[in-house]
Image: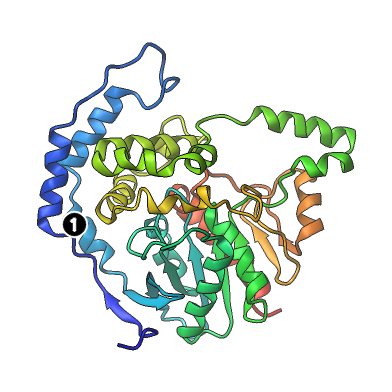
Amino acid sequence: MNSTAIRPFRIAVPQSELDDLHDRLARTRWSAQLPGEGRERGVPVAYLRELAEYWRNEFDWRAVESELNTFPQFMTEIDGLDVHFLHVRSDNPDALPLILTHGWPNSFVEFTKTIPLLTRDFHVVIPSVPGFGFSEAPREPGMKPKRVARMWAELMARLGYDRYGVQGGDLGAYAVQEMAIADPEHIVGVHIDGGIGLPTEEDVPSMTPEELAEWELMQKWQSGVNHHVLLRQAPQTFAHAWTDSPVGLLAWLVHKFAEFSPLASHLEDAVDRDHLLTNVAVYWFTNTAATSSWPMYNGLGDDGFTWPAGQKLVPVGVYAGGSPLMRRLADRDNTIVHWPEGNTGNHFLAMDVPQAHAADIQVFFAKVRNS
């Protein structure tokens, strides 16, 4: 078989795996609730029990699977790895190809609400990052966003797209900036949810007194479980539990999604319950709790954790602009052409505010596609 062939793909979880999941959920050994209020000790037992019962008795995987399969899905081998992707073509003859890259701990499911909103103006391509969902996992250490970027550039070329846009948040923000560096002659613009213009210790000497006060305030915002430290040190150790226990996996992902939803009083105000469980189920059925942790144990930059790289090769837009300090730093390292200040939403915008997210993507690419 031609290794570059594009092969149709459909999700088809064996019934035996679904039965096994339900059996494991039914036999969960629950921990005691520790003293404390709300989430100060972690995900509350009562909430997690109720959510797990919903997953076992009411969440309809077969209906979800059927809905996911309404999107055209494919597999192709790139750089020695099988890559899963959605490719939804627009009926608009002037549509711009657009590749979207999901974050961690997310999957291609992140964008399922925005696909119908985007296909009015875009041919939408949504690949699963290696080690996530149905894409094959890296076989050796060293996977980085730079390699993902080169793989995505090859994917777009293989699909016949000579001129296209790129979009991403979280892990996706790293990949799309690296795409602009790797393939600038074919990319019309980079749209990012956030993560550029954020200061580091290296920026402190150049800060004004007002900026230093903002920097000090930013240090107080650091909270929650630092998954970069945890998964850099011992991803294999933690993955044993997440792979064996669906409730263990559910608790971990609920904890992180809740931390990523600071504007919501309750997680499910930001992420619909079935949307959340669809993402959790994809992790469970594909056994990717371990393989998806490579951004942490390999590091997102050349020296471990860094913010997404700056680049001045391709124009950049963000969903929500930050403070004057962030704008100064973003302009220093990027060609910013879109910096709205009124947009709001939690970390995973495509899940939280799909209408606003899709609208901002459309506004940005209308600015740059003909430049």
Closest to the observer, 354 or 218 = 218
Q: Position of residue 125 (x, y in %)?
A: 44, 72
* Placement of 167 over or under 327, stated as above or below: below
For the image shown, how many numbered marks are present on the structure? Answer: 1
What residue sits right under mark 1 in the picture? 63
Closest to the observer, 200 or 71 = 200
Question: Residue 5, located in which quarter of the rendered image?
Answer: bottom left
Which amino acid type is shown beneath numbered disc 1? Ala
The residue positioned 51% from the left and 77% from the top of the image is 97
Q: Position of residue 232 (x, y in %)?
A: 51, 43
Camera sees residue 326: yes
Does residue 107 appear to the left or right of 11 in the view shown? right
The residue positioned 30% from the left and 54% from the top of the image is 282
Closest to the observer, 93 or 260 = 260
Camera sees residue 95: no
Scheme by which the image is coloured: rainbow
Dot 1 alpha-carbon crowd within 10 angstroms: few under 14, some 14 to 19, many 20 or more: few
Instruction: Give the quarter of the figure containing the C terminus.
Output: bottom right
